[in-house]
Amino acid sequence: MQTTASPSLPAAQQTASVRAPGPARPYGRYLYLAINIAILVFLLAPIAIVVVFALNPTPFIQFPPVGVSLRWFEKFFASRDFMHALGFSLEVAVLTTLSATALGASAALALARGNLPGARLIVATMLSPLMLPAILTGLALFQTYVLLDVGRPTWGLVAGHTLVTLPYVVRTTLAVLHNFDLRLEEAAQNLGASPVRTFFEVTLPLIKPGVLAGAIFAFIVSFDQFPVSLFLVSPGNETLPVTLFNYLKFDLDGTIGAASVVSIVLAFVVVIGLDRTVGLRSYVKL
């Protein structure tokens, strides 16, 4: 008995008979979110520990905390040494910010516009303080001041802080100048504006985001600078990080945490103050 083979199904029916795959599960998205959350926790955990230490009534870190107390903040603000160090650190940080911003922005403009020979080598040289350990920079400056027999004046400390903060201003300003449209300056000059007026009314407003970003970095780095300050401060004129270091030699309590919280809050105040005065939010897209 012979049997005949059934004709094969059309291609369309065969395709339809194949089961369509289900929706892909977003494992990659969950992994990406988990990694980002882990990074944020890693970055913010030290700040949380410092805050707990500052608010803990016991003179040592205890978790979970047994209560909330402001005794360490009272001790910090009542201390004459800490208040003098805080004021001196603010003074040095402001002077450093002004000098580093002026020198860094000027150097960035010269490097971007001046067609200087060896511009890349000059940029690498100006960024070299970021590659050299700050403690070696402080030691080198200390030896230089000893050879010059100038002692350890305040202007020497400001000069040392300017040296280590200058790369931040140069780099952020160069980043803005990289996408700068020179036709805007040419249009202003064609309309009769002088070079000085063109700079203040066209160039400076457009590079302001990079200059302000560098100024913020300069202030924060100068205020928290320890290795350079350790070699360049003079007795009686010590910055807050050096005063905290000396305090740790004899005692360890929540005053250290309170001082750290004050430094963190101060950094936020600087950023918020600049946002209120010059409007940093309008430059976020840059």
Image (spheres, grey):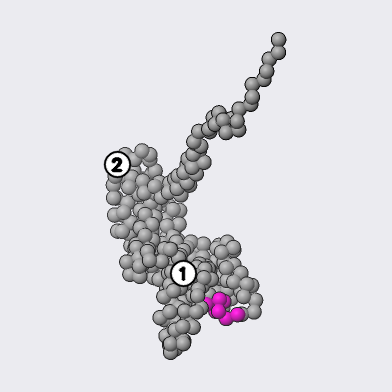
Secondary structure of the residue carrying tag 2 is loop
Residue at x 42%, y 81% (from the top left corner):
200
What is the quadrant of the C terminus in the image? bottom left
Q: Position of residue 189 (x, y in %)?
A: 46, 86
Q: Residues within 10 Å of mark 2 (few under 14, many from 20)?
A: few
- Residue at x-position 55% and y-position 79%: 113
User: From the viewer's perspective, is 286 left or right of 140?
Assistant: left
Vertical comparison of 228 with 53: above or below:
below
Q: Measure the C-alpha gap from mark 2 to mark 1.
A: 44 Å
Label ID, residue 210: 1
Up/down of 65 relative to 82, above or below:
above
Type of amino acid under label 2: Gly
Q: Which residue is mark 2?
A: 67
Q: Residues within 10 Å of mark 1 (few under 14, many from 20)?
A: many
Q: How many marks?
A: 2
Q: In the displayed image of the protein, which residue is found farthest to the right? A: 1
* Above/below status of 11 relative to 97: above
The residue sitting at 43% across, 77% down in the picture is 204
Task: Tell me the magenta residue range.
Answer: 109-115
Q: Is residue 150 visible?
A: no
